């Protein structure tokens, strides 16, 4: 059985940086996020790692893991949201005490998704892939991003519905800030490899493929163990997003995941929008998606609201989902069962 945390009103957020911290010249972003979350009724307990960044990480692997472990067992913290992602979270895994992981939400994306997936696979505790803390510093959030709070407040055996966004952000415009942080200028349009309405059901698993692919073959990426112990009999829907990979690197990563058995009993795969997906000669990302559909005989949805091209839907690892997509629009119904 999947174990679902519940977000209560007035919860205290633990802010720790198991990947990258915030360098001094950007501390104002973190302070702004704290003020914004305070106005929403949340309390903040911030660790030391959030304020430091050197050599592509906030601090040593042991220090990052120890601070996370402390926040995880603290009775004063109900939710953990890192400032943002980074590069080297994988260094911390051997120092994280998975036996003492508590039933509390962790929310984030990018490199944080490696930790989220590892926790759900090893413990059966649901984790939340969605916005990071720094992107919650606006006066308010756009409708898609704002759903993180409703999703994390959903109760066991209840369902929560999210819709595809109306528009997405093509590029950051730091000299043109908006009240909700993002510059949402482009029309959202979900696509698929099948020319028909897509409807798939299963347990959600996923994250940033750049990082979660490195769990393959490790004790932290045992998908078979997870399926046997926590969702016996249920199929899986994978949601993935590409931050920096070329099309050939993306293809290699997907083949490795397939060979490791990650796509067994899979009813569909969803890919987030990406500014990467760089073609190699004339090998495009659409080629990658179409090959995967033929090999696995499942529909592929792509350009969905997930990852580094905001806004993004909040996907809960382990939750039972019903995904529908038709005519460029989509819905995600998650049930905490």
Image (cartoon, grey):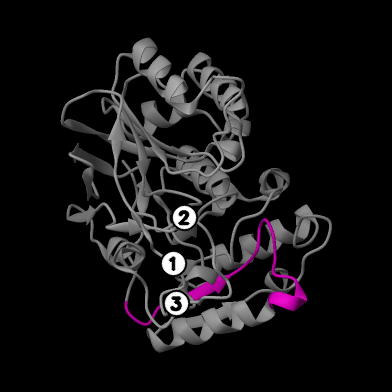
Say above or below: 174 vs 325: below
The residue that disc 2 covers is 170
Q: How many marks?
A: 3
Say above or below: 164 vs 123: below
- Please, what secondary structure does the residue beneath circle 1 have? loop
The residue that disc 1 covers is 183
What x and y, as percent, mark residue 189?
29, 45
Is-magenta flag for residue 16? yes
- Please, what secondary structure does the residue beneath circle 2 have? loop
Farthest top residue?
295
Circles 1 and 3 in contact, beta carbons < 8 Å = yes
Q: Decide which of tag 2 and tag 3 comes sooner along the chain.
A: 2
Please name whichever residue, 291 or 337, is drawn nearer the observer in this view of the structure.
Answer: 291
> Residue at 38% of width from left, 31% of height from top?
229
Circles 1 and 2 in contact, beta carbons < 8 Å = yes
Q: Quarter of the image holding residue 30?
A: bottom right
**What distance separates the C-alpha of mark 1 from that of mark 2?**
8 Å
Please name whichever residue, 235 or 193, is drawn nearer the observer in this view of the structure.
Answer: 193
Q: Which residues are magenta?
A: 9-26
The dot on residue 199 is none
The residue that disc 3 covers is 178
What x and y, as percent, mark residue 169?
43, 58
Say above or below: 237 vs 110: above
In screen coordinates, is 22 left or right of 120?
Answer: right
Categorize mark 3 by other alpha carbons within 10 Å: few (<14), some (14-19), many (20+): some
In screen coordinates, is 92 left or right of 113?
Answer: right
Is-magenta flag for residue 306? no
Please name whichever residue, 183 or 301, is drawn nearer the observer in this view of the structure.
Answer: 183
> Residue at 43% of width from left, 61% of height from top?
104
Quarter occupied by the N terminus: top left
């Amino acid at each position: 059985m999947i174990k679902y945390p519940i977000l209560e009103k007035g919860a205290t957020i633990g802010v720790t940086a198991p990947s990258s911290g915030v360098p001094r010249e950007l501390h104002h972003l973190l302070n702004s996020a704290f003020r914004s979350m305070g106005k929403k009724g949340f309390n903040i307990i911030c660790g030391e790692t959030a304020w430091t960044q050197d050599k592509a990480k906030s601090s040593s692997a042991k220090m990052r893991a120890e601070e996370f472990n402390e926040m995880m067992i603290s009775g004063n913290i109900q939710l953990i949201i890192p400032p943002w992602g980074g590069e080297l979270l994988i260094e911390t895994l051997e120092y994280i005490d998975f036996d003492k992981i508590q039933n509390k939400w962790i929310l984030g994306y990018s490199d944080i998704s490696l930790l989220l997936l590892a926790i759900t696979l090893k413990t059966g505790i649901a984790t939340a892939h969605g916005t990071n803390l720094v992107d919650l510093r606006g006066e308010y959030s756009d409708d898609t991003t704002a759903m993180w709070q409703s999703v994390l407040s959903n109760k066991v055996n209840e369902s929560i519905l999210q819709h595809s966004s109306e528009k997405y952000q093509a590029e950051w415009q730091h000299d043109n800030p908006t009240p909700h942080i993002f510059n949402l200028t482009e029309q959202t349009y979900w696509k698929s490899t099948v020319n028909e309405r897509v409807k798939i059901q299963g347990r959600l698993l996923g994250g940033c493929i750049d990082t979660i692919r490195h769990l393959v073959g490790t004790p932290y990426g045992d998908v078979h163990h997870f399926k046997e112990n926590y969702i016996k009999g249920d199929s899986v829907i994978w949601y993935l997003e590409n931050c920096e990979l070329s099309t050939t690197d993306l293809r290699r990563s997907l083949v490795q995941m397939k060979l490791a058995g990650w796509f067994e009993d899979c009813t569909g795969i969803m890919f987030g929008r990406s500014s990467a997906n760089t073609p190699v000669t004339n090998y495009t990302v659409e080629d990658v998606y179409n090959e995967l559909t033929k090999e696995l005989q499942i529909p592929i949805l792509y350009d969905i609201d997930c990852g580094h091209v905001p806004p993004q839907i909040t996907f809960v690892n382990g939750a039972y989902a019903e995904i529908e997509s038709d005519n460029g629009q989509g819905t995600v119904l998650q049930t905490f069962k």
